[in-house]
Amino acid sequence: QQRQEKYWMSINPSAISAAGWQRKKSIYICTGRSANKDSFLDKYHYQAWKEMADAEGIYFDETINGRLRGVSRMESLDIILEKASREYTQEEKEQLAARKNESYVRLLEKMSPDDLSQEVKKTLEILRQRGYKLAIGSSSKNTKKILTQIGLNGYFDAISDGTNITKSKPDPEVFLKAAEMLGEKPENCLVVEDALAGIDAAYAGDFQSAGIGDAAGHSQVTYPIQAFKDLLSICSIC
């Protein structure tokens, strides 16, 4: 009997429900920053935004930084500017965003395969061995650079990121484009996310979802998980 082709779409608790998956192909979308040790991407984003905010005299802390997860660069800037003492023109905003990105890209040069969690790498390898396709759904325009730096270049069958979308989460565009790249319908896909906005996007796009970290507590998440390796338990019943 011919084995049913499986798909995994990617880079993005205890009880994992199996409801519905025996009636579906196994197709997943994973995004977010959960694929790293000590959340180094969060750290680098925070440092870059903090540098920009401090230079402008704008209050910025890790609580505000948490609101930026899954959000585009310009929308993140708008959130930060809520604390600004004056209004900024569109040109000024673009300059601030460019300065932040320059700082962030400089910090990315510090990344190496050692920053990638071995749990995540092993999970991805097992999924590939099982015949799942992997894809990225991310609003970042630095996705390809990040994958190269941490040694995951070539792991993914499709990359939908900030270079080919016009709307960021909670709009589902990034996931819809990723599914389109693999020729699959949203109802056959699972979005794996660590950001609340990502679960909002999955729900808006008619995707099922697995949430890790903050996203595990979202009211619309399909599968709350505690660790990246828990995805193997979901897939084992597909």
Image: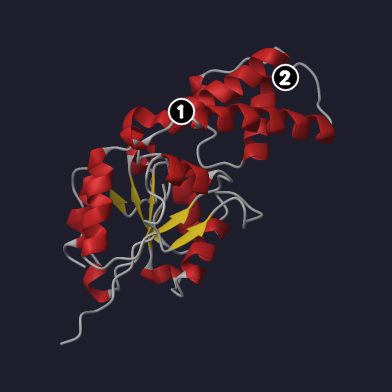
Q: Is residue 56 above or below residue 194?
A: above
Residue 79 shows up from this direction: no
Whether residue 165 sits left or right of residue 35 in the image: it is right
Residue drawn 40% across the image and 70% down it: 187
**Vertical side of 68 occupied by 122: above or below:** below
According to the image, label 1 marks what residue? 110
Give the residue displayed 18% in from the left and 48% down from the top.
15
Residue 235 tag number:
none
Q: Would you say 1 lies left or right of 146 here?
A: left
* Of the pair 4 and 118, the residue shown nearer to us: 118
**Tags 1 and 2 touching, CB below 8 Å:** no
- Quarter of the image for the C terminus: give it: bottom left
Say what amino acid the circle numbered 1 marks. Answer: Lys
Outermost residue toward the bottom in this view: 1
Where in the figure is residue 114, as x and y percent of width and height? Answer: 32, 33
Determine the residue positioned at 41% across, 47% down.
12
- Measured as percent of width and height from the top left, residue 52 is found at 66, 21
- Horizontal placement of 216 versus 144: left or right? left
Earlier-in-chain disc, 1 versus 2:
2
Which SS class for mark 2? loop
Inter-mark Cα distance, 1 to 2: 30 Å
What is the tally of numbered marks visible in this picture?
2
User: How many residues crowd around disc 2 within 10 Å: few (fewer than 14), some, or many (20 or more)?
Assistant: some
- Label 1 CA crowd tier, 10 Å (few <14, some 14–19, many 20+): few
Please determine whether, in this image, residue 38 is positioned above or below residue 176: above
Seen at 44% across and 45% down, the residue is 148
Nearest to viewer (mark 1 / mark 2): 1
Name the kind of residue labelled 2 in the image: Ala
Image quarter where the N terminus lies is bottom left
Name the element at disc 1: loop
Question: Which numbered circle lies on residue 84?
Answer: 2
